[in-house]
Image (spheres, helix red, strand yellow):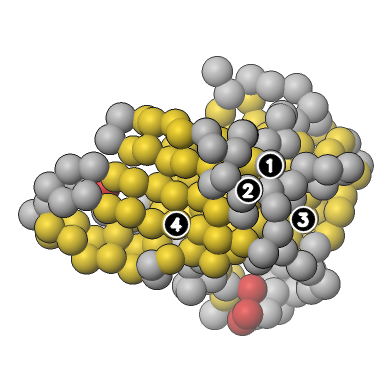
Amino acid sequence: SQTIHQWPATLVQPVGSPLSLECTVEGTSNPNLYWYRQAAGRGLQLLFYSVGIGQISSEVPQNLSASRPQDRQFILSSKKLLLSDSGFYLCAWSVSVRKQYFGPGTRLTVT
Amino acid sequence: GQQLNQSPQSMFIQEGEDVSMNCTSSSIFNTWLWYKQDPGEGPVLLIALYKAGELTSNGRLTAQFGITRKDSFLNISASIPSDVGIYFCAGLNSGGSNYKLTFGKGTLLTVNP
């Protein structure tokens, strides 16, 4: 069966510090991978998606970036965090585009 | 872009009551998904719908793909306290290379025991 992992689970970082969030998927090959951010207002905002190694599509211009160094690994990064980057970050995967499965999420607080 | 209107935004019900929520769109979708999110966790896929008119159940949950392909409904029968959470609908029009789901803003369900 397939599983998705995210770490860390929670993170508190000062403004201006770098960020690296990791997502890995097990039990499947060549998944589509997604990064979402969920603010306190509940809505899910798609940040990036990837259909293969090295292929990244950005949905929202911002100071975040994503990379896919391996087939089942997706990384969300920032060189300098802003207060507005606080939120709940969710990674998701799909093989069929008609279903997406979410990871447990990372709670990021920028202070 | 595509938008989904999900209603109601929140519901407060008594244990044992039935619940209904829905999503409507100005665009046609060929897939509707329903998720539940518990506090501090990622959304969990409950039901997937792929054909207009399709009615699918998962335990006490039943979801329907609207005939017009612009709406979907989720019903929960005989609610219990563990039904508490945020329910999201999501739609997909996977024409071409579109890999992106459009999400509703969620329905917050509170069940009073």
Q: Where is residue A19 in the image (x, y as percent from the top left)?
A: 69, 62
Q: What residue type is labelled 2?
A: Arg
Side (left or right) of B45 relative to B8: right
For the residues beneath circles 4 and 1, the answer to whether they share a chain is: yes
For the residues beneath circles 4 and 2, the answer to whether they share a chain is: yes
Q: Is residue B70 above or below residue A68?
A: below
**Callout 1: few (<14), some (14-19), or many (20+) C-alpha neighbours within 10 Å?**
some
Q: What residue type is labelled 4?
A: Asn
Real-space CA distance between mark 4 and mark 3, rounded to the nearest whole angstrom: 27 Å
Residue position for label 2: B69
Q: Is residue A111 above or below residue B9?
A: below
Residue position for label 1: B30
Real-space CA distance between mark 3 and mark 1, rounded to the nearest whole angstrom: 22 Å
Residue position for label 4: B22
**Chain bearing mark 1:** B
Q: What residue type is labelled 1?
A: Asn
User: For the residues carrying marks 2 and 1, which lies nearer the camera in this image?
Assistant: 2
Q: Tell me the SS state at disc 1.
A: loop
Q: Tell me the SS state at disc 3.
A: strand
Q: In this view, does A101 lie above or below B42?
A: above
Residue occupying the point 87% across, 50% down: A56
Q: Where is residue A36 in the image (x, y as percent from the top left)?
A: 64, 57
Q: Which of marks 4 and 1 is nearer the N terminus?
A: 4
Q: What residue type is labelled 3?
A: Phe
